[in-house]
Amino acid sequence: MKRPLLQIALDHLDLNSALKTTELLAPEIDVLEAGTILCYAEGMRAVEHIRRNHPDHLIVADLKAADAGSVLADMVFSRGASWMTVICCAPYPTMEQALKTARAYQGDIQIELYGDWTFRQAQRWLDIGITQAIYHRGRDDQAAGKGWDQEDLDKIQKLSEMGFAVSVTGGLVPKDLAQFNHLPVQCFIAGRSLYGAPDPIRAAAEFRTAIEQEWPKQYE
Ligand code: 5RP
Ligand code: MG
C-alpha cells in the first residue's frame, strides 16, 4: 500500500491568487487541483497556467462534469490536466466518453461521489474502466453540520476493496486524517485549510506530518 498523497484544491475566485498559492506551496504538495470554483471563475486558462508554472506536478481539473464528457475532457487534457473529475450521477456514456478522451492524452478520470449513489453503480464504473473515486463531504453538507462517521469509513473501505483508488476530501484539517489510517487513501485533498491558513506552509507541513505519522514507513 502506498502512503497517501497530499492534494491542494485551488478553489480561489481568481487565477492570480491561485498562482500565488501554487508558487508558495507547490514544493510541499503532490497534486495541484484547478478547483471547481476556480474553473468556473477563470475557465480553462486556470488549467493552462497551473500546468505552465508546474510542469512536473499531477494536475486535476475538478470540473465535476455531468455531460459532454469528450468535449470537456478534451478542453482540460489539451491544456495539461492529468486527471479530470466526473460527477457520480453523470450518465454512463458521459463517463465512457470522458475516459476515452482522457486515455488519448494518457490522462485519467475520477468519479466525484456526492449525494446518493450505489455500489451497483460503482461496479458499473469499474466495468467501464474507471478506477479512481473521490469520497467527498460537500462544503454545504459540512456547513450544515455533517462530520465524518463510521458509514463514511465503511464506504471508503468497500470502494477500496472493489478496486478503486479512493481520494478523500471535504473540509479536511490535519487532525482528521488519523481516522482514515486503516484505509489505503490515494490522496487527501484540502483547500481552505491550506490556502486559507494564516501560515499555509506550516499547514502543509502539518498535513505531511499527519500522513507520515498515520501511514508509517511500510507505506512509502
Ligand atoms: C468542493 C470541492 C473542494 O475542492 C474540496 O471540498 C476541497 O476543498 P475544502 O478543503 O476547502 O473543502 O471540490 O466541491
Ligand atoms: Mg475540488
Image (spheres, rainbow, N blue to C red):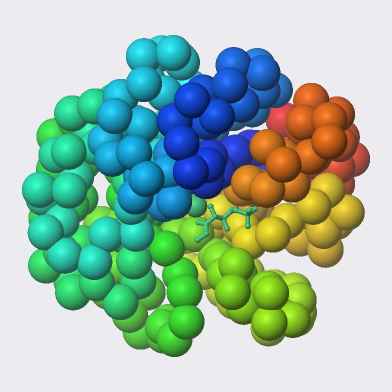
The picture quadrant where one finds residue 196 is top right
- Residue 216 sits in quarter: top right
Instruction: Give residue 47's position: percent from left, percent from top.
Output: 34, 31
Q: How many marks?
A: 0
81 sits to left or right of 212: left
- The N terminus lies in which quarter of the figure? top right
**Residue 88 point in image, percent of width and height:** 35, 71
Residue at image location 47% in from the left, 82% down from the top: 115
Q: Which quadrant does the C terminus fall into?
A: top right
**Vertical relation: 83 (above or below) 62:** above
Residue 131, can we see it?
A: no
Quick check: 16 left or right of 97? right
Is residue 91 in view from this perspective? yes
Residue at x-position 83% and y-position 63%: 179
Q: Nearer the viewer, residue 185 or 117?
A: 117
Image-based side of 136 in relation to 196, left or right: left
Q: In x, y percent, where is residue 203? A: 82, 35
Closer-to-camera residue (2/78): 78
Q: Would residue 94 appear left or right of 138 to someone viewing this image?
A: left
